[in-house]
Image: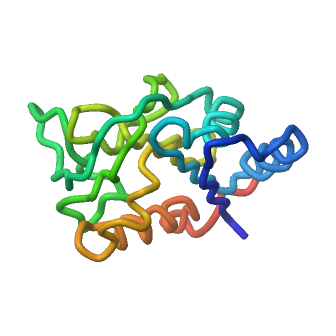
Amino acid sequence: ANQLWIISNSDQRLNDKHLAVIKKFFESGKGVYIWGDNSPYYADANYVGAALLDVTMKGNLSGGNSVQLKEKNNKSGIQQNHLITTGMNYLFEGITIATIDKNEHMTPLVWGSAGNLVTAVYEQDGKRAIFDGGFTRLYCNWDTAGTGRYVKNAAAWLANIEHGGLVKK
């Protein structure tokens, strides 16, 4: 496998042994997608996010909207001109969502309808990760709000295919 997708729950299920394996996987240049959602559904997301990326999420905001491409003055939307948002005009933010804490290592990708940061990406030293506070997007409005395209693009981006595959160290 060239990537790992973690979908968090309300209680932490991963332990230090799991984290050591995940860190080794990530440090080898393989992609990691970390999904959380509204409080309290980000226990493992915050555990792994803090360890790998120095980032966490918090909160419980109502979502339920699709956000458009982000324009300069808009508080919400999806980042234009990123490989993950290629071919997208809108994306469902999720039913209820968490807010990602600001982090200098992460690049914002999706802002929710309330203007909160819902999804951010990490790309440094041949490593890629996505940290997302809206996992309800995976099973609500999949067919009507851009999620199918988003998931495919995210998987391709995590695989680093535009550079001929994963960067080897």
Name the foreground residue: 161 vs 25.
Answer: 25
Dividing the picture into quadrants, the one containing residue 77 is: top left
Q: Where is the N terminus found, in terms of image quarters?
A: bottom right
Here the colouring is rainbow
Residue 47 at what x, y percent from top left?
Answer: 69, 34
Residue 166 at what x, y percent from top left?
Answer: 65, 62
Viewed as shown, does residue 51 lie left or right of 45? right
Q: Residue at 31% x, 58% y: name it.
A: 85
Residue 22 at what x, y percent from top left?
Answer: 78, 48
Name the foreground residue: 51 vs 94.
Answer: 94
Q: Residue at 62% x, 33% y: name it.
A: 53
Hey, which residue is sitting farthest right in the picture?
17
Name the foreground residue: 84 vs 66.
Answer: 66
Name the foreground residue: 1 vs 19.
Answer: 19
Viewed as shown, does residue 12 lie left or right of 124? right
75 shown above or below 62 = above
Numbered label tally: 0
Residue 134 at what x, y percent from top left?
Answer: 42, 49
Viewed as shown, does residue 38 lie left or right of 10? left
Q: Residue at 68% x, 66% y: name it.
A: 2
Q: Residue at 60% x, 55% y: name it.
A: 7
6 shown above or below 145 = above
158 shown above or below 70 = below
